[in-house]
Amino acid sequence: MNYAVKPTRIEITDDLDLLLHVMPPRMRAQIERLPDLPTLLEVVLDLGRYPEARFPARVVTLSPEPIARDDLDYMVGRVGTFTTDNRAGIERTLHRISALRNRLGEIVGVTCRVGRAVYGTGEIVRDVIESGKSVLLLGRPGVGKTTLLREAARVLADDLGKRVIIVDTSNEIAGDGDIPHPGIGRARRMQVPSPDLQHAVMIEAVENHMPEVIVIDEIGTEAEALAARTIAERGVQLIATAHGTSLENLIANPTLADLVGGIQAVTLSDEEARRRRTQKTVLERKAPPTFDVLIEIRDQDRFAVHADVAQVVDSQLRGRPSQPEVRVRRSDGGVDVEAPPPALPTAVQPPPAERARRPVRIFPYAVSPEHLDRAIRDLGVNATVCTHPRQADVVLTLRALAKKRPKKLRELMVDNTQVHAISSDAHAKIVDFLRELFELSGNNPEHERALHEAENAIAEVIAHRQAVALGPQNPHLRRLQHQLIEAYGLVSESTGRGHTRRVVVLPRRES
């Protein structure tokens, strides 16, 4: 179903004269003569190289003479001080001047990025912004996330009269200097002394200035994600961007997954696993999402809107990804909205009796298929080696590889595929794995209890990032617990002596 949103007019202001004024005269004269000046993206001046003006479709060399030290000194003298992130700006403009330095800290190049205030771009998602819900924007660099943040701040402050605070880490939203750019309207701006203090300024904004809305660019660390959750729990609307291009990126990112509710391992009862027709250990959302709505900016005129992040994440983890609403801006300023298609029915799975008779399909990931096949024959278990991970009930990999959590393993865990890790692919180790795997079917209640306790501890450690000690176990069961913990990318150790020796589950070490 398609329907249209009212046409809007896009207005662009760039204060380009102020940027050209800080450039060496010979470069400025060349730039001003260019016919496509209104589309200029940036000017690059590197010591000993020819100066360049970059446009969306071409690069223009501005001078037959390479950049000299005097040229850079001229610019630096007119721009002023560069901050710790090697950025400077021009007061009340959105232009950004970034420095390249040599090993001694001397500036050997500058990138002059043209900043433009674009009014009207937010109309395509204005209803979402005005809904009062917290909105997270994703998209590749340069696609317009910061521009949309600026427009959202202006609309909420000016048109709705809300108290809006912008946490402006690199002065990209409201420009350089003490007086913010008029593009943010009546919204207020808090500057951040250093990028690593962004999370602290976010909390300060809530505690000191009583905002109704906080606007943040580039949430990228665990501390910032935690600050965002704290803000949302206080009833403040958040409009923010984050590192990543899609919802799938965010779910697979252990640092930022909390923005969409976080992911935890949950062990289902036998009855619930049969009802869901899934493995006993599955991944589920562990908390309400920090953001209610997620918008993927696929390009400047095409937006994908996930209107209910909680529902979308739950569907994704169950292997039934839901489709977003897609909004496309036409050349005449109108917007076509493509409603999401109806959800596809869940694939029909065989009844329990048939599944019990079917061999367990094992995919060896960095493990010898021949060794696995031989161990299956030696034990006579009802299992088979499969050649593709998507066909597998269980993935068998090496412990050293599981610790690194490569992308392929993370994808398999999101698909609720069981991942088991062994120390090596020696025949004896694979035989031990198969014995443990088929004992998990319910033949050994002691094993079930020990692994169930480990799975609960894994979920708690992932959720709270604090160590959890398990109950005392014999060496064999401790080994099983260690293997399970490592399969989830966590760290474990044994502590105590004799009959009190037990496994402790530790949080994942940050790289």
Image: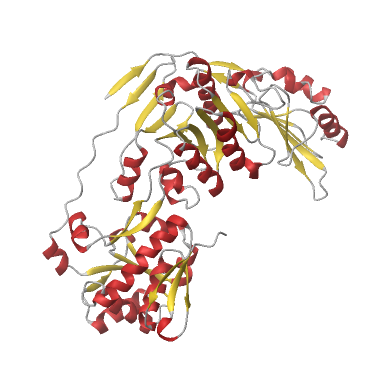
Image quadrant containing the C terminus: bottom right
> Residue at 24% of width from left, 69% of height from top?
360
> Residue at 63% of width from left, 36% of height from top?
169
> Residue at 39% of width from left, 52% of height from top?
263
x, y percent for residue 258: 45, 47
x, y percent for residue 474: 37, 83
x, y percent for residue 56: 59, 28
Applied colour scheme: secondary structure
Identify the image quadrant of residue 437: bottom left
Does residue 136 appear in this view? yes
Q: Nearer the viewer, residue 179 or 335?
A: 179
Which residue ends up furthest to the bottom in the rendered image? 498
Q: Is residue 40 left or right of residue 27?
A: left
Image quadrant containing the N terminus: top left
Identify the image quadrant of residue 216: top right
Q: Nearer the viewer, residue 116 or 161?
A: 161
Height in image: 447 above or below 314? below
Q: Across the whole image, how many numbered discs are drawn on residues?
A: 0
Which residue ends up furthest to the right in the rendered image? 70
Does residue 421 appear in this view? no
Height in image: 67 above or below 351? above
Q: Is residue 268 left or right of residue 294?
A: left
Q: Nearer the viewer, residue 496 or 364?
A: 496
x, y percent for residue 204: 60, 37
